Image (cartoon, rainbow, N blue to C red):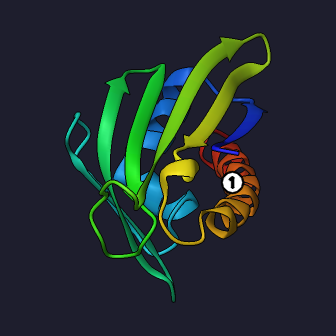
Amino acid sequence: MDTITREITVDAARTRVWEVITEATHLGRWFGDAGAEIDLRPGGRLTLSFEGHGTSVGRVERVEKPAAFSFRWARTRENEPAPGDETLVEFTLTETADGTLVQVRESGFASLTGDAAGYRRGNVEGWAAKTAELQRYLETVSA
């Protein structure tokens, strides 16, 4: 099992969802709980800080405003993404009659060293929580 996929439909314009998933001010509120930084360009650096858990470091891969955004991030906190210690996170945004369909896909677990299955299990739970937080956050900032 190499991939995790989550989908939610949010009652928000695609451009608003794009801002919330790509701007540091927003990322640091719904994704990381202790701040974020992002250089929004392919090859740019991304950091997501978590209270009591350190900082995850990522590298932006794809920026196609307002439809697709992806980054690689290291499994090991404080480390730069590297083969054997990174997964790819992809967000795809599609306009619908009800708002925006947000698809999140994380892949690359099969190529991780160490306890890849345990890391994947943790991220299955993590994406369930983070997509719910994204939905709640969008309800507060879009209201």
Label count reads 1
Quarter occupied by residue 102? top right
Location of the C terminus by quadrant is top right
- Quadrant in the picture for residue 46: bottom left
State the SS at label 1: helix
Q: Is residue 81 left or right of residue 106?
A: left
Front one among 17 and 41 = 41
- Near-viewer residue (37 or 136): 37
Amino acid at dot 1:
Trp
Q: Quadrant of the N terminus?
A: top right
Q: Could you tell me residue 74's position as x and y percent? A: 39, 62
Lateral position of residue 25 relative to residue 82, left or right: right
Residue at the top extreme, as displayed: 97
Residue 31, percent from left and from top: 54, 59
Q: Residue at x 40, y 75 (%)?
A: 77
Against 128, residue 14 (above or below) is: above
> Which residue is label 1 attached to?
127
Q: Looking at the image, which is closer to me, 119 or 34?
A: 119
Residue at the (31%, 58%) spot, across then down: 81
Image position, residue 132 (x, y; %): 75, 52
> Is residue 95 positioned above or below 58 on the image?
above
Residue at (62% x, 16% y) in the render: 94
Q: Please determine whether, in this image, residue 123 is positioned above or below residue 101.
A: below
